[in-house]
Image (cartoon, rainbow, N blue to C red):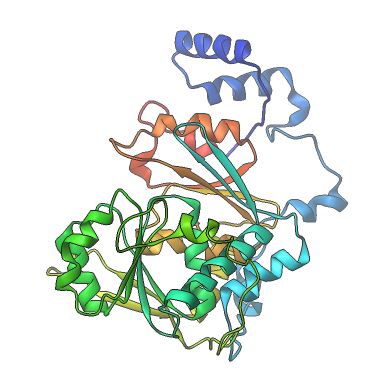
Amino acid sequence: MVRYSVTMDDELVRKIDRDSKDLGISRSDWISEVCTTHFPELEGNGISQINPDDSIHFRHNIVDYDETYESFSIDVPEYYNFSFDVVDAWAKRDRNKLAMIWANQQGEEKKYTFRDLSRLSNQVANMLIKYGPGGKGERVLIMLPRVPEWWFFVLGMIKMGVVYCPAPTMLTEQDLKYRINVADIKMVITNEENAHKVDAIFDECPSLVSKFIVDAEREGWISYPVELAYPAPVSSKLVPFHGLEGTKATDPMLIFFTSGGTTGGEPKMVLHDHSYALGHIVTGRFWHDVRSTDLHFTVADTGWGGKSTWGGKLFGQWNEGAAIMVYDIRGGKFNATGLLPIIEKYGGVTTFCVPPHHLPDDDPGGAGEV
């Protein structure tokens, strides 16, 4: 697909939109027509011709499928921990390397480097050492919207060898009770908006010991803001503990729950070990075709198991050193056109992952050209 990158001021954008409406075409088609008509030297690529000797830098990660199929393999070591071996490793290699851009519908924006994530996940791990569950294999359910704290806590739990279970915020009290009891969950991590659901079923969940809230203070809950501030900020240097950096690749790391819709009945629990993160080298390198300088944007909720990991929010992209774009969408019906200004603002988005039915009806080609 032909792709052009054009920098435009607001007045030009308005003019293009008026002309596009009059012609009955999308903005991207208007730009493509102008570029191919007035700049034939671009030869349909949107970029000047490069020196053939430099073309290797523009190749896909799979140049020859058969050759890659024969030569590619993943070495699975005896001990492996994604947080230490990937995130912390990138942080040590380049303390300024971008890992995440986060934005919300109110226009707020935050950026995090791999070093930031390393330090913030260390803080979470230290809190888990203090309050538990801190033992390898103990299970924690995390139910948060697309907020940076989801990544801090997931990476911290992986460091601890704690098994995390992502859950969508749309779950009801009964949904939560079922998952907590089936998975033998010891702690729930959530926000103020959803804390009441956990309180309502706490006494019906024998395994549930503690509750962690990330954005408020609430009676009976461990408060992330309080732990960060009082009586002194929790250390961003990881406190030594038994088993530090000692998770085996075969140790359990993650629990997904299926939708239950395909087989009928209740959702089914699926357990993955630490080598699961290594498997997503294939996801990032070959499926999403990302490189260490890329910015990947996935429209997916953190609670939807597979999509929160292989869809492009964690393992695949960070294995390759690429940054991820996170847009915190809350409430209401999904609005595809609302995403286009975000993609335009962060023009460095190189790969975009979205369900087909989320593409704009009035511009089916536009989103696909991002």
For the C terminus, the quadrant is top right
Instruction: Using the rendered image of the protein, determine whether residue 360 is visible from the camera's viewpoint.
Output: yes
Residue occupying the point 30% across, 48% down: 193
Figure check: 308 above or below 89: above
Q: Is residue 260 left or right of residue 167?
A: left
Residue placed furthest toward the left: 265
Toward the viewer: 137 or 43? 137
Answer with the quarter of the image where residue 71 lies.
Answer: bottom right
Instruction: Using the rendered image of the protein, determine whether residue 311 is visible from the camera's viewpoint.
Output: no
Residue placed furthest toward the front: 231
Q: Position of residue 135 (x, y in %)?
A: 44, 85
Q: Position of residue 265 (x, y in %)?
A: 12, 69
For the N terminus, the quadrant is top right
Figure check: 369 above or below 208: above
Toward the viewer: 148 or 14? 148
Residue occupying the point 65% across, 65% down: 64
Q: Position of residue 118 (x, y in %)?
A: 63, 65
How many numbered marks, from 0 up?
Answer: 0
Figure check: 368 above or below 253: above
Q: Position of residue 61 (x, y in %)?
A: 66, 61
Toward the viewer: 320 or 368? 320
Residue occupying the point 29% across, 76% down: 209
